[in-house]
Amino acid sequence: MRFKIAGLCIALLLLLTGSAFAQWQYQYSPTLSYAFNAVHFPTASVGYIVGSGGVIYKSIDGGSTWSQQTSPTTNSLNDVFFRDANNGFAVGASGTIIYTSDGTNWSVHPQSGALTTTTINAVWFVGLNGWIGAGAASAACQIYSTSDGGATWANNVVTNPSLDLCTDISFASATVGYASVDRNGIMYTTDGGVNWTKSTLNLGPYPYTRTDIEAIYAISTTHAVACGWGSNVGGQPTIILVSTDGGATFNTPDATYPWATYTYAYNFAKFDNGEVMLVGGGSQSAGISVHAMGPNYTTWTRYPAFYGESIGDACVVPGTNRVVAVGDAGLVALSTDRGMTWTHLYDGGMPFQGVGAFADAGKNKIWGFGAGGSLLYWDLAAGTYKYGMCSPKNWGPTTIGDLDYVLNPLDPPSGSYDSSYADVMYAAAGTGYLCKSYDQGKTWIELNHTLALYDGFLGMHWIDPLTGFLVGHKAIGNSRDEVIWKTTDGGYTLVEIQGPDPAITTSMQWNGISFAPGNPNVGAVVGDDNRIRYTADGGVTWPYATENIATSTLDLEEVVMINSTTGFAVGDGGTLVKTTDGGASWLVQAPGWGTVNLTHIAFSTPNRLWVSGADQFLWYSVDGGATWTNANVTPIVSTYDVMTVHYQGAAGILWVGCHYANVLSRTDAVAGVETPKSLPFVLNQNFPNPFNPSTTIAFTLASDDHVTLNVYNVAGKLVATVMDRDLKAGDYSVAFRADGLATGVYFYKLSTSRGEETRKMVLLR
């Protein structure tokens, strides 16, 4: 049975002109906590989404926009189906059944929790005939039926041969239907679900130790498709099965699949011409989209989806080329071209591993990357962000290991364009993928390297647009072994300049690399078991450095050389080491951080440094590491890791990337710029927050002033003026009602003659 991770992450940009940056500001953050499990369109305009916590969303414009409906349950909802435009049912945990007869108002069905107390995973209707599928592991598969449109459901378990829970149901007619069963296979019926027969499955060449069939779709009374995943040695490959004999047998259409390893197939959508789309997730929970055409569905072709989220379900908008896909971390995506390209309506933004590194090209542009090849881009001048797939079609799902933007010191010939003169951005990733972009991330060139890698490239450092070093590990036998590569042609050719140490018998990898600014001869790499190598000749030789870390099993995660002599490295167990001789020797520092695992280190000057780590950890030093101060990243949850920190010097902004898509920034003393003068007022966070439909905004004036309190949407458009008047010094509380506003994030800004400040609030309907 598939595993769902809850969490609806809506991508947000908190960049309003004139805000007082005297604290952490969210640039991209999770705000809700839903996982969307199913989507269904009964008409070309109206559609419904259900998910965790009993959440229900409705669209009346073919899936372009969605609004939340009032739900009568907090139990997770796993499936939704409408037998006509108004009458629909949703089912879920603890035997939950809810229904609507007008498409708007939902009620708990009288048999909810009484028909069964197990989880209901599927519901399907053909006219007034309907079926519900439920059950528990290693127990009789439960399928219930109705013949009166769902007013009453049969309370007896129908005859079936399977001992496991029902994962999906699909009927081609009132009599012929199919059911998928977790770990047990597929069943079919020819008498409306009274009796079921177990199908014969031909699973192809894989020696499965376990199979999970997640979904079934009845194309006709003779044809059906099923999908899921299986376990075998070395992988969990996709399972796709096709029946052309009414369910008696299901066969694997292809001998092998190129996306087979660690890819889970979860559900189907069908177009009017019979084309079937399979959706699911894979490594790093990246989405997949695979299509096949009738009549026999023997050839399946993979298309780009959206890496970073797992797709749980998809539905074709009837009579159109539009498809809506939903999934983990609040994913809602729309395709208007039959799944060839996608637009995120809501996106979770790399929900699992968060944001791992930043790269910038001047004052107004910065990128961040995360799991599954996902890329975030901010245009600070325009006040916009973009979330997308940092890869061509065949890259992924994989996790980007490092991101770097390299300025080209040369100018192209007048009146011509030559990519060799362009600035270039490099993205290095797991499984040996290396990509480059000459147009600031709009399009990417994949540099194919057939290297026997495990996780692949974990770090890189570019001397110029053509010359760079990459570190990571490659596969040798049953272990992974550390390697340093160099390129002098922009990544097209990689040369192994430092291979594995034959004296090391355990698995080992290099995690970080850094060269001294302005001196390409001096550099260092750090890796597992506190090993460090350094170079004083531009990477020709890499002798081991000496260090005095007492515990030999601690891993070093990142290194930074701040000049030709001085550098720092951080790692597990609160390890901070420093070199003052160009990397040849390293001494443990004692900042008193305890045993927290450290992930990254950055600097703006030799004296100003930042170190990030697990559990909300971010400390900074203004005296070259002699003393340290807690930067207090309190906006994020205390158990979230601060994975990376980056100082965008031209803009004077300190960026931090954290777990679950949290991105924050500062432009005050913590970032190393002058602290703004304190404002002559205090603006408090609204309460309650989130709210529906009213909330209270409180503030305090230190002196008499004219006050304006405005509310803006995420596009910066003014949606309400709450106050515009002269006030005496004192405390104030103002009520704000969001009548007529849609669910989402809004910003309220308090302006006086002596300054202004902005805060965020969330409206949940």
Image (spheres, helix red, strand yellow):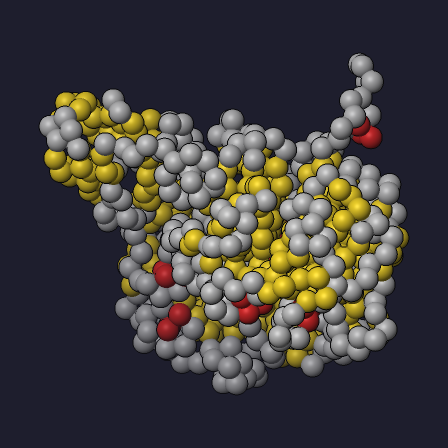
- How many marks the image carries: the answer is 0
Residue at (60, 78) in percent of width and height: 183
Residue at 24% across, 42% down: 684
Nearest to the observer: residue 683 or residue 261:
683
Quadrant into which the N terminus falls = bottom right
Query: In the image, residue 303 lies at what x, y percent?
Result: 70, 48
Q: Residue at x 51, y 26 (%)?
A: 382
Rendered position, 564 above or below 556 = above
Residue 176, picture quadrant: bottom right
Residue nearer the viewer, 278 or 615: 615
Q: Position of residue 738 (x, y in %)?
A: 26, 37
| Residue occupying image coordinates x 62% and y 55% | 568
Q: Position of residue 440 (x, y in %)?
A: 67, 33
In-image side of 22 versus 234 (left or right): left
Q: Looking at the picture, does residue 308 appear above or below residue 91?
A: above
**Quarter of image, res 703:** top left
Residue 408 seen in the current view: yes
Q: Is residue 297 left or right of residue 642?
A: right
Please provide percent x and percent y for residue 33: 40, 56
Residue found farthest to the top: 415
Is residue 132 rendered to the left or right of residue 392? left
Q: Depth check: 513 or 474 in front?
A: 513
On the question of residue 296 being in view, the answer is no
